[in-house]
Image: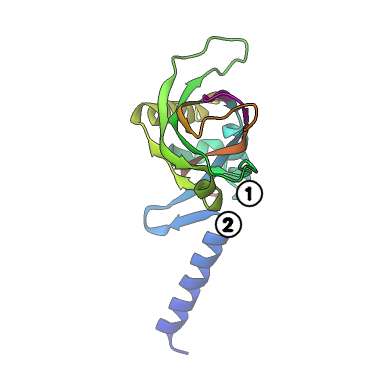
């Protein structure tokens, strides 16, 4: 086997290991990009034609620290951390014989101290004529609002300062077709996913 072929095989093996570990290695710049996901679940049961529910996302620090520990990094090795995408999915749509179509918004606010003040809500995700059955088959890439993304990124940046951000995600519908009623209730589980990436500097003594 010639040296060129051996080099290709070794590089391919390194790339495969990087993907399996949840990291993307970038040897030229000496950095590693770690990707993690935070998932929140709304449990809905509605007999009126509106939805107004909230869920808390407070495991950003836990997800980041666990990912760093798996790759033998420390918090001080992280250069930047940002949100890269959002998605939503329906895990258990109503057992009604018909589909439901929802239009509405998801807003986000921050309350690091459960007993402290809550920041003003920022628009986060726009939902337009979303079929619940269609959202069950696969995650739907969210139509994100820049204000909400900026709030998430400020919270993520706080992780680098030792903070433990706590975000409140609120779902509100402006239209549900057909309208839910006592005789025809709407019941489903709605999963909201926030994916973020941490850029880690590979230095002396690290992986």
Instruction: Determine which quarter of the picture holds residue 86.
Output: top left
Please say if 105 is above or below 190: above
Disc number at residue 120?
none
Disc number at residue 70?
1
Query: Which residue is at the front of the view, 97 or 28?
Result: 97
Q: Are marks 1 and 2 in contact (CB under 8 Å)?
A: yes
Instruction: Determine which quarter of the picture holds residue 42.
Output: top right
* Dot 1: element: helix
Query: Which residue is at the front of the view, 27 or 91?
Result: 91
Asked if the magenta segment contains residue 47, the reply would be yes
Can residue 90 be seen at all in this image of the molecule?
yes
- Neighbours of disc 2 within 10 Å: few (<14), some (14-19), many (20+): few
Query: Which residue is at the front of the view, 170 or 82?
Result: 170
Q: Nearer the viewer, mark 1 or mark 2?
A: 2
CA gap, disc 1 to disc 2?
9 Å
Q: Which residues are magenta?
A: 45-54
Please say if 112 is above or below 202: above
* Dot 2: element: loop
Position of 125 compared to 35: left or right? left
Query: Which residue is at the front of the view, 152 or 39?
Result: 39
Kindly identify the residue that appears in the image at 50 percent across and 20 percent down: 110
Figure label count: 2
- Neighbours of disc 1 within 10 Å: few (<14), some (14-19), many (20+): few
Residue 10 x/y as whole percent: 49, 74
Residue 40 x/y as whole percent: 59, 35
Kindly identify the residue that appears in the image at 47 percent across and 90 percent down: 1
Disc number at residue 21?
2
Residue 29 x/y as whole percent: 37, 53
């Amino acid at each position: 086997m010639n040296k060129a072929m051996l080099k290709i095989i070794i590089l391919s093996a390194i790339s495969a290991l990087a993907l399996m570990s949840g990291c993307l290695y970038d040897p030229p710049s000496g950095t590693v990009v770690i990707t993690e996901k935070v998932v929140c679940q709304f449990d809905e049961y509605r007999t009126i034609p509106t939805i107004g529910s909230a869920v808390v996302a407070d495991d950003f620090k836990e997800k980041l620290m666990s990912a760093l520990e798996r790759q033998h990094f420390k918090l001080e090795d992280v250069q930047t951390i940002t949100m890269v995408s959002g998605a939503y999915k329906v895990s258990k749509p109503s057992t009604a014989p018909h589909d439901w179509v929802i239009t509405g918004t998801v807003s986000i606010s921050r309350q690091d101290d459960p007993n402290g003040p809550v920041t003003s809500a920022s628009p986060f995700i726009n939902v337009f004529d979303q079929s619940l059955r269609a959202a069950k088959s696969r995650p739907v890439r969210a139509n994100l609002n820049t204000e909400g993304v900026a709030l998430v990124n400020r919270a993520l940046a706080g992780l680098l300062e030792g903070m433990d951000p706590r975000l409140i995600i609120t779902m509100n519908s402006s239209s549900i077709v057909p309208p839910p009623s006592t005789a025809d209730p709407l019941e489903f589980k709605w999963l909201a996913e926030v994916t973020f990436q941490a850029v880690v500097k590979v230095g002396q003594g690290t992986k």
